[in-house]
Image (cartoon, helix red, strand yellow):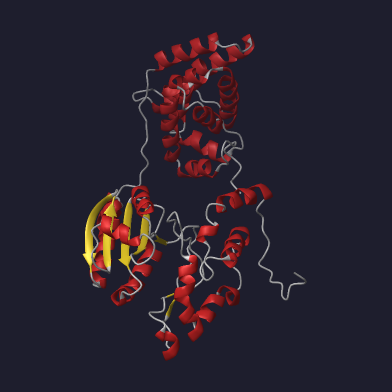
Amino acid sequence: MGQPLRKVDLGISDIDEETFRDYLDELRTIYTADKYHLLEFNCNSFTNDLAGFLTGNSIPTYIKDLPSDFLSTPLGAALRPTIDQMFRRSPNGNSLPWTELPRTVQGRSENTLASSQTDQTVPLVSTSSLTSPIQICNNPASFQSLIQRHKAVVAFFTSQTCAPCKMVEPAFEELARSKASPDIAFLKVDMSVGMGHLVGEQNKVRSTPTFLFFLNGGLRNELRGIDVAEFRTQVNLLVYDAFPPHPHAKLGLRELRSTSLKPILFSQVPKYDALSTKLLATVDASGIPADQKRSGKAFISERMIPYLGAKLEKGSSGNIVQPNISHNMALWTKETNNLSNAISPASLFPLVDLWRLAVLIPDVSTYLVTTSESPLSGMLKIALGSISSPESRNLSLTALRLACNLFANPALGRRMLQATPYGDGINPRE
């Protein structure tokens, strides 16, 4: 091949080789011989897709626009129908993937060359996906498959000799660019190409242009002619019915302003005696050393539960002597971590329930915001890791209530949200 005439720097890629190879494997079903088109889907299309995946950039415009430059000449306009007949022959009816190459209207007849008149180019902007916003479908089996695979489908039935079709086609392409998605497909059926006439016969299409609107695999509406305004309305109604807006989207400004921003808290106080008995029995049954059992039981019965009772229980005298909050919380953290590591997840929920109440106390939540050591993320990690176990249902529910109560102190809630996944609740995400 010799030395290249020009080198263009498209940037640097951070994609690893394994990911790149996986991407190439996905492209094998897209860039196949039967989908090749000299003007619309060629090696430049493949290069442009790779460049976008690797660097986020595209190949130079002067390369992508080569087909447009050719088709802007009288010779190019005259040869366009012949080229289409050569390359638009997909035996299985697969649609052509999208490219950033411009798309032109086919020459109406060979008289184009004699009159030196060419159709106007209709540029279409590339989408970020590998599939085209407009899928060419001239095969009955492929047509039915696409309708069943998409929640909403807009099918445009046209033909090469249909002049009115060319008048409404820009609106069809515009709506396809703005609304096409994995769940919404825009199909173009040329009834003069391949088995396109069979697709029309099966769907009782007798004239072009005709638009069929499908919802959940069934025909919803039909529109004939070139009423662009009505066509836009029907497309918008189809999308609305397929994906109705959330009820919150209907709320007015006054209603939004009146919505409470206060967190939902779970402040119910359990029966401490029953909770203490269950938790102490769990500690006795655990396999931790005897000295840790004694300190753990003393922490529960002599420190944590009395402290919570004094702070939260209505009618409590509150005369209990409280040690320094920093010293107290450091002991809480140590004992909680020891018990969390020794007790099975299914039996941990009474301890999590005590912390559910503890974070409602301003002194406790403020300390947890400022300290570099917190037992909360450890308990939540255990709850998340055992969420699929039926035996841990009580732990999951109690952990969710604890997570809600974190927002009693907005600073504590923000800190936990910023914590790294499965982290210590302290280090912020990068």
Q: Residue furthest bottom?
A: 115
Tell me where residue 54 appears, x and y as whole percent: 63, 58
Percent coordinates x, y for residue 383 in the rendering: 49, 28
The answer to whether residue 319 of the structure is visible from this angle is no
Q: Judge by depth and name the residue closer to the eye, 374 or 347.
A: 347
The quadrant where residue 114 appears: bottom left
Q: Is residue 261 above or below residue 212?
A: above
The mark total stands at: 0
**Is any part of residue 205 visible from this angle?**
yes
Return the x and y of residue 134 as percentages of the image width and height.
Answer: 40, 63
**Residue 252, quarter of the rendered image:** bottom left
Residue 296 versus residue 251: which sits nearer the camera?
251
- At 42% from the left and 23% from the top, the residue drawn is 393
Expressed as whole percent of the image width and height from the top left, the position of residue 140 reads 35, 54
**Residue for point 75% across, 69% down:** 1
Give the camera-side residue of 347 and 153.
153
Residue 430 appears left or right of 259? right
Q: Is residue 128 left or right of residue 292?
A: left
| Snapshot quadrant of residue 159 | bottom left
Which residue is rendered at x = 51% and y = 25% of the image?
A: 322
In the image, 218 versus 341, the foreground residue is: 218
State whether residue 427 is above or below residue 127.
above
